[in-house]
């Protein structure tokens, strides 16, 4: 019984940490829909060509919520695929707080952030360049269309609508976190560590698989394994670049084009492995 209580509380706390980011993102989206002019919306979309730089910059902050915010903004048609990918690749979740608490050298911390930033920007621009040659595949052409699909009753005002969106996504994240925490509690974390330690040469690939775990626990696990010497620097980069927290979960929830979502997932996964291998060759 005590085990179930611990699992429940961990899932609840992980989900509650995201609430401010969820609410502020939806509040921003509602404001853009209700208050801004057509010219302002056009300017935002035009400025999105340089989005990968902004996305990579925002993503390096140690919070899971930014990947969630990016998924929502992408589903609303506000940012490009490349910007979304840049946020996912640069997001490190709990890496920085763990490094600081363990008194890791500042040089190593700066190296990790610099590699992730450069890789995220470069990959984001490549993705936008390639997809620019294809028809627009964004599900929601504007926030109003997204709201109609989600049945959030936007006509009641900005605040109630933002609350409705936030509650729906919060419940979705909580249920998945509950299941995930149970799997980790019964021995998943130790099994993953043992598996990775036995396949050092394929570290970037397997670290990227761990990074796909849609929870901040993935970045915690990867960072701890690096500090314990289980993963080398390049493998850690692979895992952290793929580890977008629950951002991917929210993307699949808010964007109805599953093939598009799977393509984004594949891009993030492949980029993480490639950049991890490059880092291992250069460093």
Image (cartoon, rainbow, N blue to C red):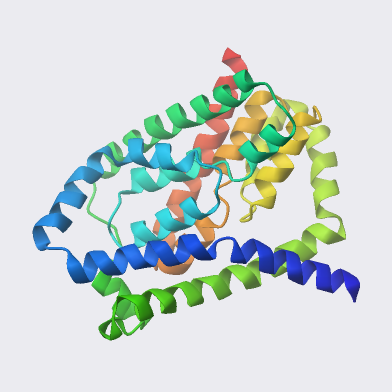
Viewed as shown, does residue 159 lie left or right of 197? left
Q: Where, by quadrant of the figure, is residue 125 drawn? A: top left
Picture residue at 35% right of the left edge, 62% below the top: 75
Q: Position of residue 138 (x, y in %)?
A: 29, 59
Is residue 257 visible in the rendered image? The answer is: no
Q: How far across and down, in percent of the image, does residue 240 sit?
A: 60, 38
Q: Which one is in front, 208 or 172?
A: 172
Asked whether, in this view, residue 276 is left or right of residue 2, the answer is left
Where 53 falls versus 154 (above or below)? Answer: above
* Residue 67, visible in the rendered structure: yes
Determine the image quadrant of residue 277. Answer: top right
Q: Position of residue 54 (x, y in %)?
A: 34, 39
Q: Residue furthest right?
A: 1
Residue 32 is left or right of residue 261, and the answer is: left
Identity of the residue drawn at 38% across and 74% down: 162
Picture quarter with the N terminus? bottom right
Residue at the extreme top: 282
Residue at 51% from the left image edge and 56% from the top image edge: 248
**Which of the pair 231/274 is nearer the observer?**
231
The image shows a total of numbered marks equal to: 0
279 with respect to 231 (left or right): left
Residue 174, x across and y down, in percent: 63, 70
Quarter the C terminus occupies: top right
- Looking at this view, is 242 or 132 the one in front? 242
């Amino acid at each position: 019984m005590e085990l179930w209580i611990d699992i429940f509380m961990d899932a609840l706390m992980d989900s509650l940490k995201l609430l401010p980011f969820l609410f502020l993102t939806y509040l921003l989206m509602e404001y853009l829909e209700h208050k801004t002019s057509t010219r302002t919306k056009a300017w935002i979309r035009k400025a999105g060509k340089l989005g990968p730089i902004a996305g990579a910059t925002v993503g390096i902050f140690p919070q899971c919520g930014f990947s969630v915010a990016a998924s929502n903004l992408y589903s609303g048609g506000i940012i490009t695929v490349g910007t979304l990918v840049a946020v996912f690749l640069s997001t490190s979740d709990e890496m920085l707080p763990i490094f600081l608490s363990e008194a890791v050298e500042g040089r190593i911390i700066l190296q990790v952030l610099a590699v992730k930033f450069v890789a995220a920007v470069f990959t984001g621009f490549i993705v936008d360049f390639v997809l620019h040659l294809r028809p627009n595949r964004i599900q929601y052409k504007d926030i109003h269309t997204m709201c109609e699909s989600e049945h959030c009753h936007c006509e009641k005002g900005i605040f109630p609508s933002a609350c409705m969106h936030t509650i729906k996504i919060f419940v979705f994240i909580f249920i998945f976190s509950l299941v995930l925490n149970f799997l980790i509690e019964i021995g998943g974390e130790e099994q993953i560590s043992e598996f990775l330690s036995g396949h050092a040469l394929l570290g970037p690939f397997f670290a990227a698989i761990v990074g796909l775990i849609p929870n901040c626990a993935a970045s915690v696990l990867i960072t701890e394994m690096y500090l314990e010497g289980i993963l080398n620097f390049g493998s850690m980069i692979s895992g952290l670049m793929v580890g977008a927290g629950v951002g991917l979960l929210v993307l699949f929830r808010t964007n109805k084009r599953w093939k598009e979502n799977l393509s984004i997932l594949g891009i993030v996964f492949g980029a993480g492995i490639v950049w991890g291998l490059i880092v291992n060759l250069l460093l």
